[in-house]
Amino acid sequence: MIQSAQTVLQDLQKGIYAPIYFLQGEEVYYIDAITQYIEEKLLTPAEKTFNLTITYGKECNMATLLTQARCFPMAAALQVVIVKEAQEMADLKNTTGQSLLLHYLQHPQPTTLLVFAHKYKTIDGRSNFGKTLSKQNALVTAKKLYDQQLPTFIKSFVKDLELSITEPAVCLVEGYIGNDLTRITNELHKLRINLTPGSTITDQMVETYIGLHKPFNVFELQKAIMQKDYPKSYQIIRVCASSTKEHAALPILTILYNLFSKLLVLHQTKETVPTKMAGQIDIHPYFIQGYLDAVQNYTLSQTMQNITHLHQADLQLKGVNAHISDDQIMKELIFKLMHH
């Protein structure tokens, strides 16, 4: 059955098991959470010695894997077989391996939990293989959360930590980290160490324990530009340029374009109530003061000119009249935004 990650975790906690768990998709947090629960919670330490098998996709083939899956547990009610990095398993990509697994799917060993942690990629749900996977087994497709889903996730996770969190703090966590659920949970776990059960996470705590150690991200770059802090902006863009895999230039450009588009709206609005102004530019009221300060730092003329600079940089990054590297384009852009 196609199930959500939350449903699968709840069933596992209730002792409701499926013979096969196929965990796939972009959001590795949920794949890791289910895999870790099965690996750590379903067997006692003594039972794990003979009944827990962990292998990796590059290292195993389907025939050997299914031979192990068909074995009976030793002195335990269950045997657990986990394939980590299953997307690297060659047999999942060819008809021979898929045929072997399809045959096993029809007659799975009831005392075995077979887990495929298939990260980043998904099996074609329209294929016979994909359709069969979804029938009697737990098929989870973990998708990246949308931005509007992040606050609910953060609050729910904090509640599980026996803490609470203020709305501004939620906004800051989202702003510093984005929608990387693994990083969000890791940072909140570390913050939890400094708090007692029942405590409330505030925006000041997030600044201290999370923001302080995350100085080089796009959120901080935007903040530095809003404050017209050229040295810090240049320092951040240098770090971003040295790690283009994590900080590609075009997405950064999009965020900066959105920033100055919001400033343009604020320059032209007749609204004077900060909360209503925040609604006009679709941000949380907690952040409106920073935008109002930025309006003082950039005149209407400068704001419009900066939108032009961003458009020109966009063309250069896409290859139009580009005679310099992407990182040099971004460094020149940062200078223009604050000095022209």
Image (tube, rainbow, N blue to C red):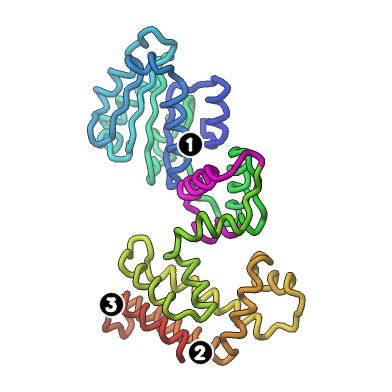
Q: CA distance from mark 1 to mark 2?
A: 48 Å
Residue 208 in picture, x, y percent from top left: 53, 58
Q: Residue at x 38, y 7 (%)?
A: 75
Disc on res. 325: 3
What amino acid does circle 1 point to?
Val
Q: Earlier in the sequence, mark 1 or mark 2?
A: 1
Mark 3: which secondary structure? loop
Q: Quadrant of residue 44?
A: top left
Range drawn in magenta: 171-198
Question: Is 183 on the left or on the right of 160, as rendered?
Answer: left
Question: Is 340 on the left or on the right of 289, as rendered?
Answer: left
Q: Residue 108: in sight, yes or no?
A: no
> Does residue 232 sit above or below 210 in this rendering?
below
Q: CA distance from mark 3 to mark 1?
A: 41 Å
Q: Tags 2 and 3 in contact by the CB under 8 Å rule?
A: no
What amino acid does circle 2 point to?
Gln
Disc on res. 140: 1
Question: Is 67 on the left or on the right of 16, as rendered?
Answer: left
Residue 8 in picture, x, y percent from top left: 53, 31
Query: How would you classify the magenta stretch by its main secondary structure?
Result: helix
Residue 4 in picture, x, y percent from top left: 54, 37
